[in-house]
Image (tube, helix red, strand yellow):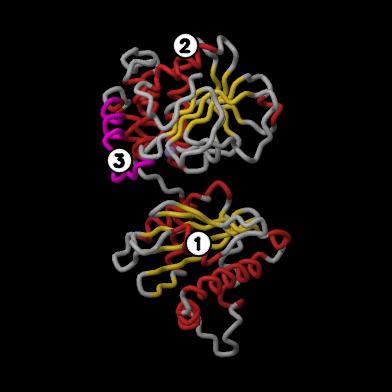
Amino acid sequence: MFALHMGTNPAPRQGLEAVLKSVGASANVVLITGHPDPDALGSALAHQRICQEVGVPCTIANVLPVSHRQNRAMVKLLNIDMLQVTSSDDLTPFKHLSLVDTSTPEPTIDLPADLKLLTVVDHHKMAEVDAPFVDIRPHIGASSSIYAEYMAQGLAPLENAMGASRVATALLFGIQTDTNDFQLATSADFAAASYVRRFCDSDVLKRVGRRVHSASGMTVLGRALANLLVVRDFAVAGVGFVSAGDRDSIATTADFILQREDLDTVLVFGIVEDRIDGSLRTDSPSVEPATFLTSVFGKDRSGKPYGGGRADKGGFQIPLGVLAECEDKDSLWNIVEQIVRSRLSKVMPEIEREYERQHPDPHNGHHHEESSSGRYSREF
Ligand SMILES: [Mn+2]
């Protein structure tokens, strides 16, 4: 009876409050989908605070680790307490599930059959979700903006001092991150940000806001720059083996290279655990990341594309299957590099020629083991 769609109801916040109050003291869990990012974390903290106000015990949980260094700094400096869930057993103490910044539960874990979906607050694509409270607003820049709006409208308002600054700071990071530092912000995002800003912890804002690059992230960047293949305004760079904890350095490297003035599309890829993992960044009005990645890498056997994305960025993951067991890391990397290059040359034939030009081999144009041996085998 409280189901709300697309924020058309004049005051979704009353709906959320009523639904939470209706469950009494039964335990709620906000299970974050994917690697926790600032928007999910900000929304989760806000949800937890609202639960506290209405007397519902609420735990924030995650399955995948916080992988981006800046996000780890945020979790640490804001003291965000999360339950690390590894199996569905960890979720049995909870009666109700709340989803923030997504309408799909984490797919890598089976949910207990009796865990009921209670609330969904999201700003991604409209989805058919069956829950007592659903507030999905595809036109807003961040889920954190939606939660900030509930608070501004009087649901656990930040004016009540208790724990306000960490929630406000997390919400601001969420809005800032998902709107690309406000470049994509709507008026609702600006209104939300200006409401939370005055409650923020300025010191934490300064400390987390500083872009942090790890030493290994710098190494990834260095490898990418050393291996950059440029064809007109497009660049591709393979970075070799990257540890799971440093996966985001592939994305930050692509962001960095895109700043080169003569480039408008950048693809960076490496091997992370048992897959090829890559990031695409583009400023080009004619490149649509999801379409580009599908035309290059195609789809898996179930018809799902290996990559996807939004207007200016995308990512792809291609499982290596049994090849991942290959002990000879240099050979495996050579194969992966060759595959990505040959896939790209389907849409951009000049790539192969540019590679040959950069790697002249007097003996055989197709073997480069000697020149690349040992360069990428060390994971960092
Ligand atoms: Mn978001």
| Label 2 – label 3 distance at C-alpha | 30 Å
Q: Residues within 10 Å of mark 2 (few under 14, many from 20)?
A: some
> Which amino acid, by three-letter code, is at mark 1?
Leu
Q: Which residues are magenta?
A: 177-195
> Which amino acid, by three-letter code, is at mark 3?
Ala
Residue at left offset 26%, top offset 24%: 198
Who comes first in sequence, dot 1 or dot 3? 3
Who comes first in sequence, dot 2 or dot 3? 2
Residue bearing the label numbered 1? 293
Residue 207, position in %: x, y?
A: 35, 35
Residue 234 lies, with reference to residue 83, above or below; the image says below
Residue 212, position in %: x, y?
A: 40, 45
Residue at left offset 34%, top offset 13%: 161
The quadrant of the rendering that contains the C terminus is bottom right
Residue sitting at the far front = 1
> Which amino acid, by three-letter code, is at mark 2?
Val
| Label 1 – label 3 distance at C-alpha | 26 Å
Q: Secondary structure at mark 1?
A: helix
Q: Secondary structure at mark 2?
A: helix
Q: Residues within 10 Å of mark 1 (few under 14, many from 20)?
A: many
Whether label 2 touches label 1, CB < 8 Å: no
Residue 141 lies, with reference to residue 152, above or below; the image says below
Residue bearing the label numbered 2? 54
| Label 2 – label 1 distance at C-alpha | 46 Å
Q: Nearer the viewer, residue 82 or 378?
A: 82
Left or right: where does residue 28 sit relative to residue 231? right
Q: Is residue 191 magenta?
A: yes
Q: Nearer the viewer, residue 288 or 15?
A: 15
Whether label 1 touches label 3, CB < 8 Å: no
Residue bearing the label numbered 3? 185
Residue 277, position in %: x, y?
A: 56, 57
